[in-house]
Amino acid sequence: MIVFLVTADHAYTLGRYLSEWAPELTSHIQPIFYEENPWDWLELEATYIFSDIERLTPLEIHKAVAYAEHLASLGFRVLNHPRNAPTRLALQNILHEAGINPFRMFPVTTSSELKFPVFLRLANSHLGSIGDLIHSLPELEQRLAGLDKKHSRADDLVVVEYCDTRNGAGRYIKYSAMKVGRKIVPRHAISSNQWMLKVPDIVDSDAVAIEKQFLLDFPERQAIENIFLQANIDFGRIDFGMQDGRVRVWEINTNPTFMPVKKGLHFAREQIINKTNLWLIEALKELDSEPVVSDIWRKVARRHDVKRRFWWLQRKLFRSKRA
């Protein structure tokens, strides 16, 4: 059994993947919310994946670290030990110091000697940039002054130096790969004319050819493996660009979108994306190949389902959403 520890607000990533792409893995993977305080009651033999680490509160981090150490002491496999996995800001510092990323990320309160253009974002959010590129210090100050309270008061507001990764055709390509234990699975290469891209807005013959070549050949495999090792991350998705033949890392997400929304997948990408899903299923099964259908795990599943329904009511009435 694989226990996937996740924040309740963002459990949809795994839920959608299992329902749309991998229903056969439902008996292999049990999601558990951090809000369920699993450190107080769950210590069954399994592989435990700690996701959403950057979204946890300091108290939750403290408890998660102790929990991971306890699980490891019992001989259980722990992926993404929260004591070792860096925050997004810390990761960018590691990659810059290692010479992998030429650009830098700073908290807005400590940024200095910036190389413009830059952009603003919340380090722990997955929504991308806040606004477009900023080309000067006066423009940055003006942008900061105009932020709404939600952004201006955020503890994780950062400024990031822009890195130009356009290819010879002037397009941006965002490459992604997932680390699943010991395996690296290439996921996609999407094309756009926009520097901040979440979905492919260009799906022509050139874009499809670039994606197929990346997925089938994956020449960056060793470089990506080394970056995951430097980051101390055992499970997650890395998003990166290529500049002058070198990898530039945008982020590593420990609770990634496993696969795109199936209904919206362009027909020209269907075959190759379906192939990557088979690779991903194989990698997940290798983490813990035997599904557990015992009464004790059924009890865990029922307990989680009750908590899930109760959490939605609490969330609707009382709680603000996590970033």
Image (cartoon, helix red, strand yellow):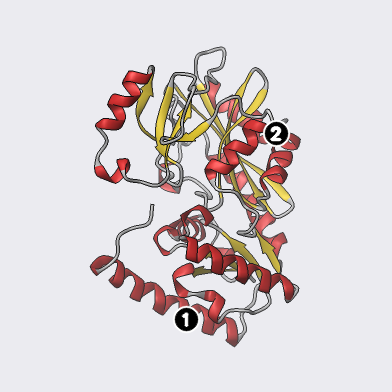
Q: Earlier in the sequence, mark 1 or mark 2?
A: 2
Which amino acid type corresponds to the residue marked 2 in the rendered image?
Answer: Phe
- The number of numbered badges drawn on the structure is 2
Task: Tell me the quarter of the picture where residue 248 sits.
Answer: top right
Residue 135 relative to residue 233: left or right = left
Tell me where residue 127 appears, x and y as whole percent.
Answer: 40, 41
Q: Which residue is mark 1?
A: 302
Residue 215 versus residue 162: which sits nearer the camera? Answer: 162
Q: Position of residue 304 (x, y in %)?
A: 46, 76
Foreground residue among 122 and 302: 122
Observer-nearest of 99 and 80: 99
Give the structural element (helix, strand or loop) at label 1. helix
From what the image shows, is residue 256 above or below residue 244? below
- Left or right placement of residue 276 versus residue 303 in this view: right
**Res. 286 visible in picture:** yes
Q: Which image quadrant for residue 74? A: bottom right
Element assignment for label 2: loop
Q: Label 1 is placed on what type of residue?
A: Arg
Residue at (28% x, 25% y) in the render: 142
The residue at the point 62 percent across, 84 percent down is: 294
- Which residue in the protein does label 2 denote? 218
In the image, what residue occupies the spot 38% across and 17% down? Answer: 136
Q: Position of residue 65 (x, y in %)?
A: 60, 65
In the image, is 159 to the left or to the right of 316?
right
Q: Position of residue 26 (x, y in %)?
A: 55, 68
